[in-house]
Image (cartoon, helix red, strand yellow):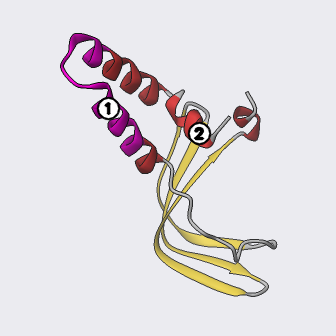
Amino acid sequence: MATFELYRKSTIGSCLTETLDDMVTSGIITPQYAFQVLIQFDKYYITVPHFSFLTSPSLLQGHLHTYRFCDNVWTFILHNAQFKTEEGQEIFKSCKIVACDSDLLTQ
């Protein structure tokens, strides 16, 4: 399963897809516009940062601003996040971490 499918099968993704289908069927929007909305949904919910420096064991520190658990997906928002590895450290003003059970990706 592609990563974006995990979000599309979530509650918000299912509701968005159903609503767009209804709007296309009713003639309110075109199928092309509905497709563009789904692409924007994917861009918003799927951000793949390039953390090539996290290839070895690391330490994560920061101020936990927000956390939530919805549809078996954890989302953490950290401020002043520090990622420390043997090679060095990276500091981010704000960081969003999305984590899920890897078994969900194989379903």
For badge 1, the amino acid type reads: Gln
32 magenta-colored: yes
Residue located at (71% from left, 39% from top):
101
In the picture of the structure, the residue carrying the numbered disc 1 is 32
Image disc number at residue 73: 2
What residue is drawn where x is 45% and y is 23%?
A: 14
Q: Position of residue 90 (x, y in %)?
A: 60, 82
* Of residues 26 and 16, the one drawn nearer to the viewer in this rendering: 26
Q: Mostly what secondary structure, the magenta segment?
A: helix
Say whether disc 2 or disc 1 marks the residue closer to the N-terminus: 1
**At 57% from the left edge and 34% from the top edge, which residue is drawn?**
5
Q: SS class of the residue under badge 2?
A: strand
Tell me the magenta residue range. Answer: 22-41
Q: Position of residue 60 (x, y in %)?
A: 65, 71
Where residue 59 sits, quadrant-wise, is bottom right
Q: Residues within 10 Å of mark 1 (few under 14, many from 20)?
A: few
> Is residue 74 placed above or below 97 in the rendered structure?
above
